[in-house]
Amino acid sequence: MATRVIDIGDGEHVTIDEVGSGGRGLLLVHGFTGGRVDFADHMEALAEAGGWVVAPDLRGHGDSW
């Protein structure tokens, strides 16, 4: 699993975890008090099923700002 920080402009950043490549993309979005770490135990298995799995920290949560 790789973690990336993406600059979205105006000093804002979104941190994502991603695993896999190709195939269909699967976006995992946490709830109000959650974060991308909520999906860490499941991402590898989902990617092995075929695809690219991404879990971001939404703005104001986890490591995104």
Image (spheres, helix red, strand yellow):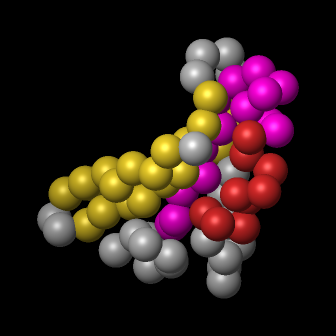
**Residue at (32, 51) in percent of width and height:** 6
* Pick the front one: 37 or 64: 37
Coordinates of residue 16 in the picture (x, y in percent)? 48, 53
Is 5 a magenta residue?
no
Q: Is residue 35 above or below residue 22?
A: below
**Residue at (73, 59) in percent of width and height:** 39
Q: Is residue 39 above or below residue 49?
A: below
Left-right relation of 11 to 35: left
Q: Quadrant of residue 65?
A: bottom left
Q: Is residue 28 above or below residue 33?
A: above
Looking at the image, the residue that sits furthest to the bottom is 33
Q: Look at the image and tell me in which quarter the N terminus lies.
A: top right
Looking at the image, the residue that sits furthest to the top is 23
Coordinates of residue 35 in the picture (x, y in percent)? 61, 71
Left-right relation of 10 to 42: left
Q: Quadrant of residue 40?
A: bottom right
Coordinates of residue 12 in the picture (x, y in percent)? 26, 66
Report the span colored magenta: 45-58
- Give the total of numbered labels: 0
**Residue at (82, 38) in percent of width and height:** 45
Coordinates of residue 2 in the picture (x, y in percent)? 49, 45
**Residue at (17, 68) in percent of width and height:** 11
Is 47 a magenta residue?
yes
